[in-house]
């Protein structure tokens, strides 16, 4: 699929994996809707201005905001790409140490992680794919492509990652059935499972760098954290390579996460 001249939506697009993907898509000629939470508006608007796109305040669980972001993309050009990078993480053990019911994993937290990471991803897919289905098909019948972000935690979930792993495992699990569903209208769907990627989530400063060094020791090769542009490179390949469909691909330098 030709990226030059299309419009694309990147959720979580103002920072981290989303920012890198927004920049790479723009460098390839796409007009990008940087979709992120309203509290990220200043950063998102600055990025959008820099890359020639637009910022859309978008909570992925809010259908009205997802539709607004999709309509903004349609105004920039034919919407043919969606990259779902929005998500949250949480680490909590299933039960507490004192044996009381109150110390068990907060159910509302579990629901929130699943709502944003899994249901939010599906919400964006169903809305963006609806818009893509109205595009004129190319010579092979293609109308668009979608890339989701899961995590190696979908397969190697660590202690405390019940909600996160469940949400990301759900993203992997729905990739094939959605790809089969959307094949009828010429829309491809793939999912990336990132390993340890160096993003702002790890903070800054000496303590942060030492923590990242410890994490890198468990990586097979190369022994370092990945960078966001490496993720963005894979995301754009999955969008542009029209023979990539219904796949869930790890980008993790061979790491297999230990229990903790």
Image (tube, rainbow, N blue to C red):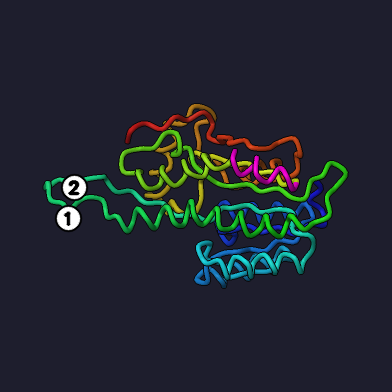
Above or below, 69 against 106 in this view is below
Q: Can residue 92 be spotted in the picture?
A: yes
Residue toward you, 5 or 121: 121
Q: Check residue 260 for magenta coloring.
A: no
Name the residue carrying label 2.
Answer: 96
**Mark 2 to mark 1 CA distance (whole Å):** 8 Å
Which residue is at 59% across, 38% downward?
Answer: 176
Q: Where does the magenta region start and end? A: 176-185
Left or right of 43 in this view: 186: right
Instruction: Identify the secondary structure beneath mark 1.
Output: helix
> Measuring 65% from the left and 40% from the top, which residue is drawn there?
180
Q: x and y percent of residue 157 in the render?
A: 39, 37
Callout 2–callout 1 Cβ contact below 8 Å: yes
Q: Main secondary structure of the magenta part?
A: helix
Point out the tag, 2 or 1, that comes first from the N-terminus: 2
Which label belongs to residue 102? 1
């Amino acid at each position: 699929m030709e990226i030059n001249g299309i419009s694309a939506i990147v959720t979580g697009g103002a920072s981290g994996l989303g920012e890198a993907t927004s920049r790479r898509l723009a460098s390839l000629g796409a007009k990008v809707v940087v979709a992120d939470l309203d509290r990220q508006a200043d950063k998102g608007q600055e990025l959008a201005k820099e890359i020639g796109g637009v910022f859309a305040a978008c909570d992925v669980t809010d259908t009205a905001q997802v539709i607004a972001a999709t309509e903004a993309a349609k105004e920039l050009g034919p919407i043919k790409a969606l990259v779902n990078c929005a998500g949250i993480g949480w680490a909590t053990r299933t039960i507490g140490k004192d044996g009381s019911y109150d110390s068990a994993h907060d159910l509302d937290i579990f629901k929130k992680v699943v709502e944003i990471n899994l249901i939010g991803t599906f919400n964006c897919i169903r809305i963006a794919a609806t818009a893509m289905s109205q595009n004129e098909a190319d010579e092979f019948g293609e109308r668009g492509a979608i890339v989701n972000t899961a995590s190696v935690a979908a397969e190697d979930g660590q202690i405390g990652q019940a909600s996160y792993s469940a949400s990301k495992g759900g993203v992997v699990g729905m990739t094939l059935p959605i790809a089969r569903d959307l094949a009828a209208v010429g829309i491809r769907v793939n999912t990336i499972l990132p390993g340890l990627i160096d993003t702002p989530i790890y903070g800054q400063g000496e303590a942060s760098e030492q923590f990242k060094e410890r994490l890198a020791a468990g990586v097979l090769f190369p022994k370092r954290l990945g960078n966001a542009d490496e993720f963005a490179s894979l995301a754009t390949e999955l969008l542009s390579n029209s023979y990539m469909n219904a796949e869930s691909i790890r980008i993790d330098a061979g790491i297999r996460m230990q229990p903790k």
